Amino acid sequence: MILGGLEIERVETFAVALPTLRSFGVAGGAVAVAGRPSLRVLVKVSAGGVSGWGEATPIPAWTYETAESIVTTIDRYLAPAVLGRPAWDLDGVAAAFERAVNRGFSIGAPLAKGAVDIALHDLLGRAAGVPVGVLWGARRTERIELGWIVSGQSPAEVGDSVAEGRELGYGAFKVKIGLHDEATDAAVVEAVREHAGAAAPLWVDANQGYTAHAALRMARRLDGLGVTAFEQPLPANDVAGLRRLREVCPIPVALDESLRHPSDLATFVRLEAIDIAIAKVQRNAGLTLSRRLCALAEDCGVQLMGSGLTDSDLGLAASLHLFAAHGIGTPVDLNGRQFVESPYAGPTVRVEGGTAHVPDGPGLGVEVDETVVRRLAVNVLDAGSPKARREGV
């Protein structure tokens, strides 16, 4: 099929309630609650008889976008801005998105924009009959090591969590901190190190949970435990604080929420306020801008690590293609499989022993059963509807 002839004909949104496997929290609050469905917004983009799928993960505890805002932003603003445009014009779509929902200090509705961008990549790969990495001409690795997430447990409970991860083949661990007082946070990390062993890669993520003084105290507590990165210790917009912290922090400082747009990375590089950049597809409004951020990090000599947003399998696949294209070889935080199921996915990402295989199928390499998507769909815009009440929305 000639990609140049494809024009975007339709953009559809489906808020789906996915089964939650276990609870998960960050410094800002709960991300997943066992026994309650986890909401994801799936997006289908159609052009010339071909369709592609993308995903948005609404987590109000992490950022301002909700399931309701994602659905309305796409349906009322983003979709009308791109209908009739060439599906291959990814840069043009990104520019149209900025005109439809402009940037403030942040990028402006990145989760909503990212779901459409991911779906367009899936569509283009399917139209061409090749994986997304082939479209880019970039795949440096076929397998990516995943990290097991420890979140919310007390020091006494950590051993069971680490043992579960090790039993499933995970050899690297990420610990969410900022959920307890400083002494308990430190004790949790110490317990993970004890149970994981001295050689296991280990990094911590505060999700903006500390002040500059508290972050430095915590870093000094953790120094000597072999912690490879201190991820997002301060609020995303505390540029001055992050610069001061990086100058004295004994552990490399990694930035996640601070890097909404590639230009944010450029600012932190100029200010010498970053050691490690976290690549995260949804945070950067999809694959188009994520590739720009990763290329800039590589050109500037900034180390890249990879992370996700508790994605289901569509988001997982998108991240794997990005990380493989840029050779992100350190263990990554793509934790969706640990916390949510993806019953809409047929042939999909293969994860074995804590290692994810980069999909080889066309597009993202995830076969979506639309019948299941429609069965799982809930009306998030009418919380009083019987189905919404039944699903706990």
Image (tube, rainbow, N blue to C red):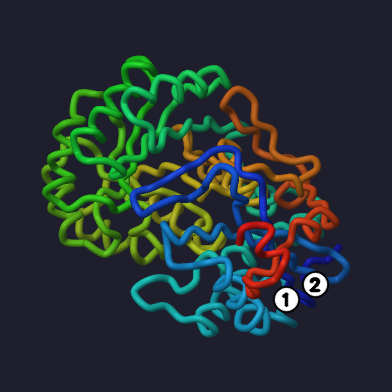
- Residue closer to the observer: 348 or 151: 151
Drawn side of residue 251 relative to residue 323, left or right: left
Residue at 44% over, 50% down:
30
Residue at 64% over, 72% down:
384
* SS class, disc 2: loop
Q: Which mark is residue 86?
A: 1
Q: Which mark is residue 385?
A: none
User: Alpha-carbon distance for marks 1 and 2?
Assistant: 6 Å
Q: Amino acid at mark 2?
A: Leu
Residue 339 position within the rendered picture, expressed as x and y whole percent measured from the top left = 56, 40
* SS class, disc 1: loop
Residue labelled with disc 2: 6
Q: Earlier in the sequence, mark 1 or mark 2?
A: 2
Residue 312 position within the rendered picture, expressed as x and y whole percent measured from the top left = 63, 48
Residue 121 in view here: no
- Residue closer to the observer: 277 or 193: 193
Name the image quarter holding the C terminus: bottom right
Q: Is residue 319 above or below residue 198?
A: below
Drawn side of residue 292 relative to residue 53, left or right: left
Name the image quarter holding the N terminus: bottom right
Residue at 40% over, 63% down:
260
Tell me, yes or no, whether the two marked residues, 1 and 2, touch with CB atoms within 8 Å: yes
- Residue closer to the observer: 360 or 210: 210
How many neighbours does mark 2 have within 10 angstroms: few (below 14), some (14-19), or many (20 or more)? many
Q: Quadrant of residue 74?
A: bottom right
Q: Amino acid at mark 1?
A: Pro
Residue 161 position within the rendered picture, expressed as x and y whole percent measured from the top left = 46, 25
Residue at 52% over, 22% down:
164
Residue 382 position within the rendered picture, expressed as x and y whole percent measured from the top left = 65, 74
- Residue closer to the observer: 91 or 348: 348
How many neighbours does mark 1 have within 10 angstroms: few (below 14), some (14-19), or many (20 or more)? some
Tell me how many marks there are: 2
